[in-house]
Image: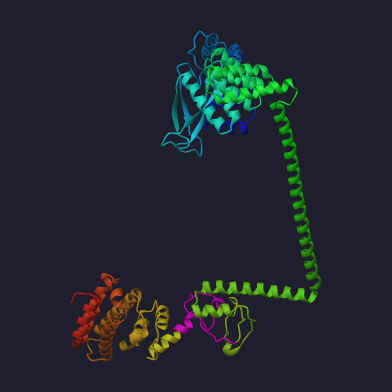
Amino acid sequence: RAAEMFTEAMHLDSSNHIYPANRSAALLKESKAEAALEDAELSAKLCPSYAKAYFRKGQALAFLGRLDLAIDALKKALDLEPDNQAVKGTLENFQRLRNGEDPEAILENPATMTPEGAEVEVEVPKQAREGDNVTLQINVPEYGPVKLQAKIPAGKKAGDKFKVKIGSLTELAETKRVEAIKAYKFGRIQKAMEDFTDAIHLLPSDPSLFVNRSAVYYALGRVEESLSDAEQSLGLQPSLAKGHYRRGVALAGLGRYPEAVSALERATTLDPADALAAEQLAQARDDVEKQRQKLPTSREAQEEDEEERAKRDKFVTKRAEAEVREQMHAQWLQAQTKKKALAGKALEQAEQISNARLSAELSSAKRADQHKQDTERAKFQAVAQRVEYDQFEQMVAGASLKPTKTKADSQLSGVILAAGSNASVPGLAPRLINPYADSQASAGERWLGGSKEREMEGVQRGLVAGEGAPSSCKEFLKWWKGLEKDVSGRFRMLRAIEPALLSKIFRTEMEAEVLGEVIDTLHSSMNAQRATTHATAAAPHTTSEEEANAAATHTLQFLNATTKLARFELNAKFLGKAEKRKVQEVVAWSVERSPSLQEEGDLALKSFGCAA
């Protein structure tokens, strides 16, 4: 994470010499010595007098096992800052390490190897999971970095850290040997060679490591190096049968068949059960005889076979390439033919298009666009005016019809297309679209049939004259809302309804909100009737008193009629204490005015859940 932050800083200011020096230290902590060395050199280049740049350079070089160059870099840093104790201490450690005076002296990096071993802290890389192998790198003095494989322990995820204990040099060499053999079996010959090389540097006294690397060199075609490793193994252990076998195979590979026979004979003598050595010995003796007779040896015949095979493979490859090119060319020709056919068809269609047809299509497109605009405007207008659904359908359906003007009764007919317009759609009956619009609305906003005031004046006249009553729930609610601020008007509306016909008006239910408003209206009317009755107490049996008795009777009957509507029990549960108290007062007043209504009063109280 630190290296990433310093990288961002370097992008923002590439001339700052401190950032690369700091990133060098961060990279060295991650065992990335090569990248750390590059950053240290960049810092020194940006500021040659910056001592820490040479200090970081020396650390990176030491991590790579190049102690002489590391000491030179630290000396340069000490020349620039003679009093820097960190540079002095590190320089002394490196000098002792080079001279062998203090073999346990280690680098500043925690992943440095000592003869007794090391403990390395490893960070789980991104997208890695528990059980995966990660590569870590340690530094071996006088050799350099060595890569190892470590398995992520259980419970660790990306970004977590865990420690890996590395044993002695012998144990580390054995680990590298196992990795090399595994790589060789899976055909990763180059990786096997690198692992055997690391193992040899860690444990140069083991002859078997040289024998194994000799086989790897031979597989890579590096026969002379294979022979060198075989001879080094025999130098460590002259009686090693595998060493003589590898030497004989390498000599045969170089065409030195008599020497190969001698080496292989020595191998079969030391290990008579080695069938492979016996087979190679017979082949080498046969090659000696062929060489004496100036005939092609097995190696020469093999080289000729390989040349023939290479020629044959080259011919097959070229033939396959030619076939692929031929197929691609045929596909290209087919695509071109199809493209020309489509272009010709398009040209024919273009020639058939006349100016009249283009004009007709353009006009049709304009009409369609105008229809869309008119429909959208009608919808927005309907929403703004809060019209009912059937009227909304009329507005949208007639939105794109040709507007006309009418003068019948000085009123507009049809559906107005725009607010304030005198245009309408013929063939549609005049209807009041928005009877609940604000009384302060402009004339353009008062749609067909006049304003709210005009219609409600008609309703009031009918109620006062005792004519007409709402015949449906829709009409009841329409009138009821129109008389929202007129309590006496609402009471006259209720008086106009026969209680027995209430169930025909509300075929489904009377909602709790409307029921509460009806109770409020009856209670307010009761108070008004009381005031009128007291005012005329001196003249009993007057018309006002008779009207009060009739109102009380109708009120109680109306309350009982509401209790017989559908879903009354459910809606009554939404009534509050205030509404129930008003029901009690209304019932008590009605019974007081007409004692014969006592039974009906008790029934109403029971239905509304009020105390008797």
Q: Describe the colour scheme in one phrase.
A: rainbow
Q: Is residue 358 visible?
A: yes
Q: Position of residue 377 (x, y in %)?
A: 59, 72
Residue 233 found in image quarter: top right
Q: Is residue 110 visible?
A: no
Principal secondary structure, stretch drawn in magenta: loop
Residue at image x 47%, y 84%? 455
Work out whether 82 lies above or below 543. Answer: above
Residue 255 found in image quarter: top right
Work out whether 353 lies above or below 593. Answer: above
Q: Position of residue 276 (x, y in %)?
A: 57, 26
Q: Quadrant of the C terminus?
A: bottom left
Residue 428 part of the magenta segment: yes
Depth order, front residue of 593/354: 354
Q: Which residues are magenta?
A: 427-456
Depth order, front residue of 361/140: 140
Residue 422 part of the magenta segment: no
Q: Position of residue 474 (x, y in %)?
A: 42, 81
Residue 300 found in image quarter: top right
Depth order, front residue of 63/265: 265
Classify residue 507 as left or right of residue 108: left
Depth order, front residue of 341/95: 341
Work out whether 207 lies above or below 407. Answer: above
Question: Looking at this rendering, what residue extends furthest in the right direction?
Answer: 351
Q: Position of residue 583 (x, y in %)?
A: 25, 77
Q: How many marks?
A: 0
Classify residue 359 as left or right of residue 19: right
Residue at image x 27%, y 79%? 527
